[in-house]
Amino acid sequence: MAEERKACVSPVTSFLQNIDLVRRQLRDDSTHRKDNENFDAEKLWSEMEKIFKVISHEATKISLAFCGRPAPSDKECSSLFSQAEKAILALVSLFYTLPASQGLRLIKSTKDTVLSLLDSMRELISNIQEGCAGNQQQLQSTGTVWQDANLFASMPKNDKDAVVRELKTCSQLIKDALEEIEEAIEGDGIQDDLCDLDEEGGEEGGAQWTESDKALTKPCVGLIKTTKSLIKKATDCVQSNGLTQQPMEIQELDKLAELSERLSPSVDDLIMDLYPPVDLCKVQEKGKTLFEIHQTVLGFLRSSHMTGEDDQKWLEFLLKANQHNYDNILKVT
């Protein structure tokens, strides 16, 4: 059976080389996007949806062709992969017509979805090349292509939706981090999964918080809770008030996403330094970083089109909560 597929090695290899080139270009995308005053978003998404379906269909054709015997002839292989390549190139070309004026976060979101489909398509063809044709692994990778092609339906089609999706992802990460440190507090700071083994194979007791450490965790957790509230309020503001009609509105949405993506890593950094043994200087430094990001995001929101008079009360509340928690960190450290 392997000999029957030797004739297809060249077309498969060529396809993989070409799709790898396209994937690298997308990941290293530095292409200058021209603004298009006559850009038709509805037309782009309609055409892109069709191409996603075509790629899914071509994946099915290729998978079926390699499920039975005899293996496809050299001519059949070339035809199969040629059609798939045309669809992939059409998709990438269409992606590059999405102008920067539509929003950098929309471009990023669209690129991620396109890359996900190309990655799964590459995996399918790679499995065929490696001799997995017709087995469960090939069927699973075919299903992954279908799944990624279906992502188009839920993919953001404007910058507002793209930013909301990013903020919700950030919100979940912060929620998980907060739950982690709260569980650690209940366990007195012991990280069971990090306990070392002593020479006799027994577990040594994990390091625990001192009384001064415990006093420090309270304002730090308070600061992280401020982060959680902030990202939730920011998400609500974008959903309720975010606009994409004017360039400035789109730029503000992108800027909010840029600022907010610093929140989750900063929360993680602070939490890591809260575990015993605690270095007070490091905690103070990480707390200051998170405090300053809060200040920046709140200040930006206050001056953006996404907030109005009705939002001033919670903005002021979070500013005070941020300052209060940071002041308490400084008192303890």
Image (cartoon, rainbow, N blue to C red):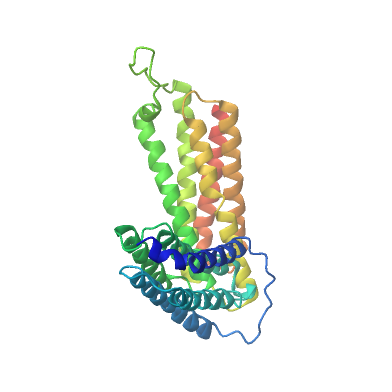
Residue at the (39%, 24%) spot, across then down: 195
Query: Dividing the image into 4 quarters, which one contains the C terminus?
Result: top right
Quadrant position of the N terminus in the picture: bottom left
Task: Classify 81 as above or below 194.
Answer: below
- Residue at the spot 58% in from the left edge and 69% down from the top edge: 305
Q: Is residue 79 left or right of residue 92?
A: left
Say left or right for 204 vs 216. left
The percent coordinates of residue 165 (x first, y second) are: 46, 63
* Residue 274 at x, y percent in the picture: 49, 31
Q: Is residue 282 above or below residue 17?
A: above
User: Residue at (59%, 76%) from the top-left corner?
Assistant: 93
Where residue 270 sits: x, y (%)? Answer: 52, 37
Q: In the picture shown, does residue 240 fall above or below 266?
A: below
**Count of marks, rendered view:** 0
- Please tell me whether residue 178 is drawn above or below residue 167 in the rendered image: above
Looking at the image, which is closer to me, 324 or 142? 142
Question: Viewed as shown, does residue 58 lie left or right of 70?
Answer: right
In the image, what residue occupies the spot 46% across and 77% down? 75
Nearer to the camera, 36 or 149 = 149
Q: Can residue 255 be seen by looking at this rendering?
A: yes
Whether residue 237 is visible here, answered yes or no, is: no
Q: Residue furthest front?
A: 3
- 11 or 110: nearer the viewer: 11
Residue 278: percent from left, percent from top: 51, 25
Asked where in the image residue 323 lies, by quadrant, the reply is top right
Closest to the observer: 291 or 46?
A: 46
